[in-house]
Amino acid sequence: MMMAKKWAKFLRDFENFKAACVPWENKIKAIESQFGSSVASYFLFLRWMYGVNMVLFILTFSLIMLPEYLWGLPYGSLPRKTVPRAEEASAANFGVLYDFNGLAQYSVLFYGYYDNKRTIGWMNFRLPLSYFLVGIMCIGYSFLVVLKAMTKNIGDNGGGDDNTFNFSWKVFTSWDYLIGNPETADNKFNSITMNFKEAIIEERAAQVEENVHLVRFLRFLANFFVFLTLGGSGYLIFWAVKRSQEFAQQDPDTLGWWEKNEMNMVMSLLGMFCPTLFDLFAELEDYHPLIALKWLLGRIFALLLGNLYVFILALMDEINNKIEEEKLVKANITLWEANMIKAYNASLTGNSTGAPFFVHPADVPRGPCWETMVGQEFVRLTVSDVLTTYVTILIGDFLRACFVRFCNYCWCWDLEYGYPSYTEFDISGNVLALIFNQGMIWMGSFFAPSLPGINILRLHTSMYFQCWAVMCCNVPEARVFKASRSNNFYLGMLLLILFLSTMPVLYMIVSLPPSFDCGPFSGKNRMFEVIGETLEHDFPSWMAKILRQLSNPGLVIAVVLVMALTIYYLNATAKGQKAANLDLKKKMKQLQLLVASNSHRYPGGPEVLLTMLFETSTLCEGLENKCGVAISLFT
Amino acid sequence: MGNKQTVFTPEQLEAYQDNPFRQRIAQVFSEDGDGHLTLDNFLDMFSVMSEMAPRDLKAYYAFKIYDFNNDGYICAWDLEQTVTKLTRGELSAEEVSLVCEKVLDEADGDHDGRLSLEDFQNMILRAPDFLSTFHIRI
């Protein structure tokens, strides 16, 4: 008895401890009470992303970076691990490090540092295999976790029926019980009143036949402008990437700061200004605010997606260039090696007591390393994105709030109520930015294992910085209408981005040859050959034989067919069950009506009859039969 | 303790209380129905309003809160009270009655002019925002 009580107490204490460990709970609570649940949902999403990135970071850090750091050959021992002689003088400059060249490039942060030996250290840790598997596992884990979150949310929604209970929902679910701040409560009351008034007007107004043709023409015009903007931004990015290739050929000292960071700045600025343009074009369209919001989100999504893909295309161009360059460099290196061998032989036959012939790794000519270049591009993009966001918040939100607050005393019109007033927190913009940044992380982390770590730092500081900015400079939204199932909408976008960003990575892994001079897969024809090699060397031969049989095309096709059939079957059962569900609901309604209209016949009241039915009818299985019996009793 | 205020004047207390249903919440969760909560009632209240409470439980208590005259049904008068409290009296009487009519139209399944618990549950469990708004975070 005592043990049971102690165990119960221990469990309760553990639950309390777990609840106390959840980070940033107080911050989120403060924001919720001041801004309502929709703004807080952004911060909840940020916290969830932080958790996902933490797992990715732990995987890449403990299974790739740490073993290489502990057991791999140290810096300076191999050509691929040393800064080339030509760059050595500037390798530790801040400017060079900020660009992730120099010492930062030749470190565990990037793909090119890793050696291609099959095992390292006294534990025989298989680094190339671990590198490959961790990359695949990160992608798999991300898919799992996003799908799990989505399915959990689907259960909450109860599906379907978008407008049947419009007014009822407005009456019973519009008050946000989380609000704990008088100003927010005022805003909430006002927005609820506005909401009701609008709904009443919509309900009362007859369909006014406006000039349909004018409206259609304006909408077509708006879409045309949007299309132009999207095309323009795509072209701008492509041009910027081409220019950055040219700059890469030139001497770094002749370039100013803008030239070096041009491409990242272009992408970040486009992401900042185009949504405002879209908002402007939406004025032409004259849609209901909720629909307009959906169009805006869709357009911003298309913009960011287009930018990302143009960036990837330009990168593929550069990768192909580097692969071409490799052939030339290979030819050069064989020449150089021939010279070295001649010199070595000469030193042997000559002065045999002289200094041993030694070539410093920094002097060995190097092959181009496209994987490190890809990793560097993504890291630079992430860093510049972070800086742009923070600077935007500081200038756009904080300075503006300071200006409005302090210059209000000596200004002609009321700054707080008119233009510019305080900014509202842009939920959808911030969530989209978060999703796309995560897409870049997923794309780049195979080539730069440090990227999840950098992202963790960024999310951590973002949380504090944005929490402070929101509480200090923003005001609660005056108009509160949410894209109602927005939680699943954002998760759906995240899933789409995950899929679209892992596709290029998988393509690169499967079809591009790894660089011959850098990384854990150098010397192989394709990166995934590391799996085949492991099977041959480390597994007993019978297992390798079985697995080779399993990859027999016939078997694979059969498995794919079975999976397709299972999906079709499950889909059909789900549809059938939905239909059966609707049917049962109809029968329940019928039963209720019948009971209500016949309630005078039974002295004990309808409840007695129903309990009688449901408890004594052991012959009837299932609700369907019980309804059928009840209906037949009445008719 | 510290520098937080712990004794409030009635005016200050009013400023902290924005929830239009605050009195109803206290009445529903108190044992004798007049707003005096024991510790158990207090715990029940926070447990129902927390994130982990199941939807059906929340729907049940939401029904009791919105049932102003405690007769087990949400009738038109209850709805009028709810809408008036929600809009702080900014809507005209005609608009309020229109809203109440629409609600009864939409949600009254057995057409008896008032919402029973089943009607209410049927309607509220489909609402996408119900869980996130009927929630107090501790």
Image (cartoon, rainbow, N blue to C red):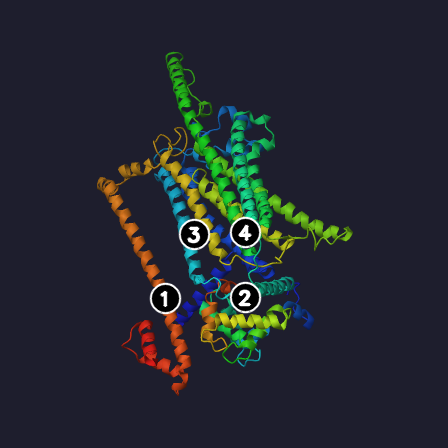
Q: Secondary structure at mark 3?
A: helix
Q: Residue furthest top?
A: A350
Label 4 crowd (10 A; few <14 / some 14-19 / many >=20): some
Whether labels 2 and 1 belong to a single chain: the reply is yes
> Are the residues flagged by discs 2 and 4 in contact, CB closer than 8 Å?
no
Query: Tag on residue A581?
Result: 1
Q: Which residue is mark 2?
A: A170
Q: Which residue is mark 3?
A: A146
Q: Which residue is mark 4?
A: A428
> Are the residues flagged by discs 2 and 1 in contact, CB closer than 8 Å?
no
Q: Secondary structure at mark 1?
A: helix
Q: Nearer the viewer, mark 3 or mark 1?
A: 1
Distance CA(mark 3)–CA(mark 1): 28 Å
Distance CA(mark 4)–CA(mark 1): 35 Å
In this view, the residue in front, A447 or A197, is A197
Q: Nearer the viewer, mark 4 or mark 3?
A: 4
Q: Quadrant of residue B33?
A: bottom right
- Establish if A586 lies above or below A538: below
Chain name for mark 4: A
* Residue type (three-letter) at the residue carrying disc 3: Val
* Residue type (three-letter) at the residue carrying disc 1: Asn
> Are the residues flagged by discs 4 and 1 in contact, CB closer than 8 Å?
no
Q: Quadrant of the N terminus of chain A?
A: bottom left
Label 3 crowd (10 A; few <14 / some 14-19 / many >=20): some
In this view, the residue in front, A13 or B49, is B49
